[in-house]
Amino acid sequence: MARKQHYPDQCLADILTNIESARSFIGEMTREELHDDDKTLQAVLKRLENASEAYSRLCDSKHGAPEVAKAIEARHPGVPWRHFQSLANVYRHDYDLIDVDLVWKVLQPGGAATLVEAVIRRELPLSQIPPKP
């Protein structure tokens, strides 16, 4: 079975949608409340994993559009792209070692997901940006 190609705009929209969902799950929670709410934490982790995986798909030379990823990275060198891309592997394979403080930090101003989200909002054509929840 052949894998379908992931179009750049769809990958970028998937990243944006998943980051926004993770943030909406937290809502007005504090870091401590997130730490104590395993169901919400697991939902947030899954959405961040999905966002990271969507970026990996974009970078994939066989089924993605690595030239688009490289161009975006070049225009926004201050974003921790590799850190963001590695989140999926960490959340999938090191799930027993996840530090809630680091998950919290990823979604806070200046965190990897927040920086990626801001860039995608600038890079994605307006017609492709999903409405905020």
Image: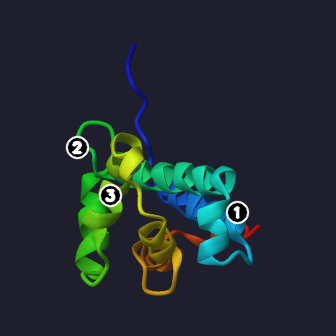
- Mark 3: which amino acid? Gln
**Total labels drawn:** 3
Q: CA distance from mark 2 to mark 3?
A: 15 Å
Q: Which residue bears the numbered disc 2?
A: 61
Q: Residue furthest top?
A: 1
Question: Looking at the picture, does residue 77 appear above or below residue 10?
Answer: below
Q: Which residue bears the numbered disc 1?
A: 25
The mark lying in front, picked from 2 and 3, is: 3
Question: Looking at the picture, does residue 41 appear above or below residue 1?
Answer: below
Examine the rendering and report whether any part of residue 129 can be seen.
no
The circle drawn on residue 85 is 3
Q: Earlier in the sequence, mark 1 or mark 2?
A: 1
Where residue 63 appears, as percent x and y from the top left, is: 32, 37
Q: Earlier in the sequence, mark 3 or mark 1?
A: 1
Residue at image coords 36%, 52%: 97
Q: Are marks 2 and 3 in contact (CB under 8 Å)?
A: no
